[in-house]
Image (cartoon, rainbow, N blue to C red):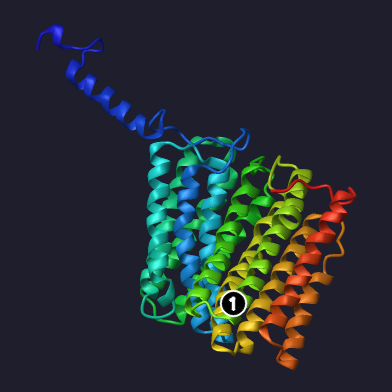
Amino acid sequence: MSADARGPAGEPAGDTTDATIGRRLLGALTGGEAVRAPTLRTGVERTASRLELFFDLAFVLVVAKLAGALRADVSVHGLLVFAGLFTVVWWSWAGTTLYANRFDHDDVLYRLYKLAGMAAVIGLAASATGATGALRQEFAACQLVLRAILLVQYYRAYRHVRDARPIVRLYLLGTGVGGLLWAVSLVVPPPICFVLWGVAVGGEVLVPLLATRDPAAVPLHLEHLPERFALFVILVLGESVTGIANGISAARWSAPALVAAALAFVLTAAVWWSYFDLAGARAKRLLHEAGGERSLRQHDVYVFGQLPLTLALAGIGAGVQLAVQQSGAGEVPLGTRVLVAGGVALYLAAASLTNSGMASRSRRGWWWPLGAAGIAALDSALQLPVVVVVGGLDLLLVLVVILGNAERSADRLPVDPL
């Protein structure tokens, strides 16, 4: 080959051109450099990415499937299965969110990992209703794929972000052991496989708690974190909106169903208002007051306080659809009414517990969950009509919103809405 056919480095000019074109094509996928090393992303302004919003769509499907299974079995057993599976799924979402909070660098590899994880979550949705039965292996396999993807991502962060290595090492260990337990669960029968699921998630949950006690300065991004968890709240609240529509349709637009639907909508709107103007907004302010030089106790309280809160909202969504649908048939069973009232009580308790745990002193928010629990107890004793139960919960939540906003307006609770 003549010298004219070679590039400046002695390589064939055609090969250099091909490589350049390849890099440009890959770069076009992200609008910038195709492959970049992970960096600590907590020191720059950022919000939830469009990829994260797209990723969340798959979890909408999972929550809907789990809520559907709960509606089919409103019993103690059904509630326990729902709570267990929701916890496992929520932690899968939270685990990926905690990685993205620190290391989302939006190159081609990161996008491909995220999309592969989304495909695994779609698999979770497809197997959720049979996760404790015939589809348990498919459910576990999808969880294993999510761990494998997260493990590779943390390995990249370990290689490239030296300051984060002490923390990343903990996540590598927790995710690796968790993945191994999910793999073993594929070949052992129930109930042993379910015990392994619980141990796997429990071990992974310990990692952020241990990271809090590590002296390494690996902060969380305190704008991105509450935004992501608020988006998950919206995702779960969508189950109530969908449930109202499905309930009206199933009850063929009967007058009793429409009354129940109107009350259920007020309840859903009041929950949204109370979270985004009060509970969630106050938690966000407390996060900023705690600071972000490294993980702190307040961060742990905030993150794990979201689990019972969103679990409660998902339960409310399942109960709301049943309440509207069954109103059209003329009788709403006690289990449905307790599901809605108990969900409201758990939501208010989780919000109070989270904010009390993050603050230096407790607040007087415990009357509200006790009020919701009192409505459930009174209903159990007197067998109240569903309109009375849901109407009472509406009144309680509207009072939470009115009094909470009045307190904020008086500058006794200075928070910015989410």
Asked whether the viewer can see residue 198, the reply is: no
Residue 132: x and y, percent?
44, 79
Asked whether the viewer can see residue 348, the reply is: yes
Residue drawn where x is 64% and y is 71% of the image: 262
Q: Would residue 322 be found to the left or right of residue 282 on screen?
A: left
Q: Within 10 angstroms of label 1, few (less than 14), some, or many (20 or more) residues?
A: many
Q: Quadrant of residue 357?
A: bottom right
Residue 324: x and y, percent?
57, 78
Residue drawn where x is 77% and y is 46% of the image: 290
Q: Name the residue under label 1.
A: 319
Is residue 210 depicted above or below 257 in this figure?
Answer: above
Residue drawn where x is 89% and y is 48% of the image: 411
Residue 68: x and y, percent?
48, 75
The residue nearer to you, when weighing 241 against 142, is: 241
Q: Residue furthest front?
A: 255
Element at label 1: helix
Is residue 377 depicted above or below 141 in this figure?
Answer: below
Q: Quadrant of residue 220?
A: top right
Q: Residue furthest bottom?
A: 382
Is residue 187 depicted above or below 274 in this figure?
Answer: below
Is residue 160 depicted above or below 351 in this figure?
Answer: above
Q: Which residue lies furthest to the left in this view?
A: 1
Residue drawn where x is 67% and y is 83% of the image: 386
The amino acid at mark 1 is Gly
The residue nearer to you, when weighing 377 against 98, is: 377
* Tag count: 1
